[in-house]
Image (spheres, rainbow, N blue to C red):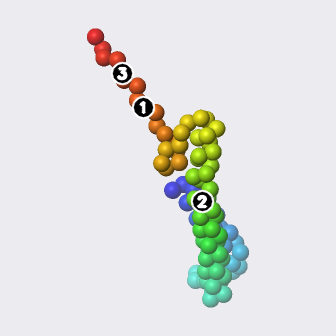
Amino acid sequence: LRDFLLVYNRMTELCFRHCVCNLNYRLLTGREESCLDSCAARLVRANHRLMGAYVGLVPAMLQRRAAEYGAPAGPSGLPAASEPSPVPAES
C-alpha cells in the first residue's frame, strides 16, 4: 500500500506540474484537464507494463536464490519450508 501511495503521489505531482500553469481559477481549463488525463493515462500504462515485467521475473529470481542457498524451491517459487522440529516435552 505504501508503494502504491508513493507512486500515486509522484504521478499526481508530476502531472500537476506539467499540466497546470494557472492557479488563478478554481476549476481546470479544458486544456489542463485533457493534459492531466493523458499524462495520468500514460503513467498508468507505463506502470502496468513495469509491473507485468516484474511479475514475470519474480519466480525466476526466487528459484535462482533458492538454488544459490541450496534449498529446494516450493511450488510458489519460495524455498520450501523445513519441517518443524519437535519441541521436547517439559518434565
The residue tagged 3 is 87
Q: CA distance from mark 3 to mark 1?
A: 12 Å
- Farthest residue to the left: give it: 91
The residue tagged 2 is 56
Residue closest to the eye, 31 or 27: 31
Classify mark 3: residues with Cα within 10 Å, few (<14), some (14-19) or many (20+).
Answer: few
User: What's the residue at 58%, 81% (across, down)?
Assistant: 26
Taking the image as drawn, is residue 47 in sight?
no
Position of residue 84 measured from the top left corner of the image (x, y, whole percent): 40, 29
Tell me the kind of residue under disc 1: Glu
* Pointer 2 or 3: first along the chain: 2
User: What's the residue at 53%, 48% (across, down)?
Assistant: 77
Residue closest to the eye, 42 or 27: 42
Label 3: element kind:
loop
- Do the numbered discs 2 and 1 sit on residues whose CB atoms are within 8 Å? no
Position of residue 73 measured from the top left corner of the image (x, y, whole percent): 53, 43
The residue tagged 1 is 83
Could you tell me which quadrant the C terminus lies in?
top left
Position of residue 12 measured from the top left corner of the image (x, y, whole percent): 62, 69
Taking the image as drawn, is residue 52 in sight?
yes
* Pointer 2 or 1: first along the chain: 2
